[in-house]
Image (cartoon, rainbow, N blue to C red):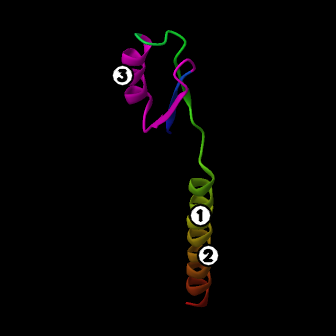
Amino acid sequence: MKFILIATAMNLQLAYSSQEICNKALDIIKAQDPKAVCIPAGEQPIETMMESFFNMVKRLEEINQNKLTKKD
């Protein structure tokens, strides 16, 4: 999951690939802005769409495989 570091005073909104990396950046930013926090960024729409697409392909392959094995 990606995490966002938000520093309100500096209006920074950066996304990090993990909470650990976000916390490292947070430690540095806290010296400038004590209100800075790391929060989960949530899933991006494109990631959700691609995940749904790959899940659909897997289901179609399973259905196809089931039909092939039933004939034999």
24 left or right, relative to 53: left
Q: Name the residue under label 1.
A: 55
**Image position of 31 with respect to 71: above or below:** above
Q: Which mark is residue 16?
A: none
**Image position of 3 with respect to 56: above or below:** above
Q: Name the residue under label 2.
A: 60
Which is nearer the N-term, disc 3 or disc 2?
Answer: 3
Q: Could you tell me which residue is drawn at 59 percent across and 57 percent down?
A: 46
Which is nearer the N-term, disc 3 or disc 1?
Answer: 3
Position in image of residue 12 (x %, y %): 51, 28
**Residue type, mark 3 in image:** Lys
Q: Provide the secondary structure element on which disc 3 rests.
A: helix
Q: Residue 24 carries which label?
A: 3
**Label 2 crowding class (10 Å Cα cut-off): few <14, some 14-19, many 20+?**
few
6 left or right, relative to 18: right
User: Which quarter of the rendered picture does the C terminus lie within?
Assistant: bottom right
| 3 vs 1, front mark | 3
Rounded to the nearest angstrom, the CA distance separating label 1 from label 2 is: 9 Å
Q: Which of 21 and 61 is in front in this view?
A: 21
Q: Which of 33 and 16 is in front in this view?
A: 33
Q: Provide the secondary structure element on which disc 1 rests.
A: helix
